[in-house]
Amino acid sequence: MGWAKARFQHPGLWGPVLAILLGACQAHPVPDSSPLFQFGSQVRQRYLYTDDAQDTEAHLEIRADGTVAGAARWSPESLLELKALKPGVIQILGVKTSRFLCQRPDGTLYGSLHFDPAACSFRELLLADGYNVYQSEALALPLRLPPHGARSSDPAHRGPARFLPLPGPPPDPPQPPGHLALEPPDVGSSDPLSMVWPSRGRSPSYTS
């Protein structure tokens, strides 16, 4: 019985075969490839630098007493750890003080030793100019740094809300004079790693 003849004499045999083939070729959903998912379980160390139209330039600091303020230059208290809680939502921890950045219902900021998801979770919104805006997930209030000279507990002052995450920590200082750097191995030598003790004589076999 030829192939063509069998194909028409037994059409019912092709039903299960076609079902198997169609099932194998069926499209499956592609895992979510949103760029926001690249921050999942990611920890970044950053300095949050901010400025505004009033020439306020400061780095956000979480101090040991729980106050949040700005300093003109980066400091150990301004080194922050940004950790993703879920896509687009982060927690901010002061590396030196081990305090979480949190926000009260009136919008003021404080540093807490305990993480409260309702007060210490922030949405990270990326702006086109490279700056970020951080917004309380529960309160929908923007994270604003108090302007210079204002107390962090004073809600009447509305400081800048745009932050530029700067990489940290800074590079290590250069090595002091007198420190001898390791010389690269001499690949042209028969003993490039200097594993053979020097001897007074040299074997003729090493002579080029």
Image (tube, helix red, strand yellow):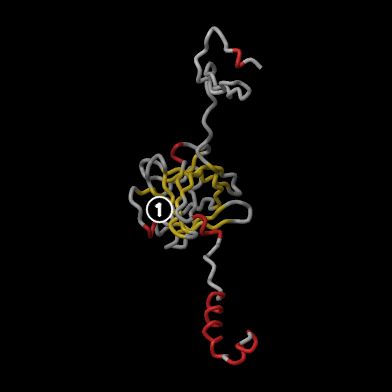
- Name the residue located 42 percent from the left edge and 44 percent from the top edge: 94
Q: Is residue 24 above or below residue 32?
A: below
- Name the residue located 46 percent from the left edge and 45 percent from the top edge: 150
**Residue 158: x and y, percent?**
50, 53
Residue 197 or residue 150, whichever sits in front: 197
Determine the image quadrant of residue 67.
top left
**Residue 69: x and y, percent?**
45, 44
Residue at image mark 1: 102
Residue 127 or residue 8, whichever sits in front: 8
**Residue 22: x and y, percent?**
56, 79
Within-10-Å neighbours for mark 1: few <14, some 14–19, many 20+: many
In what element is the residue under mark 1? Answer: strand
Residue 49 or residue 21, whichever sits in front: 21
Q: Is residue 10 above or below residue 159?
A: below
Q: Amino acid at mark 1?
A: Cys
- Name the residue located 51 percent from the left edge and 31 percent from the top edge: 172
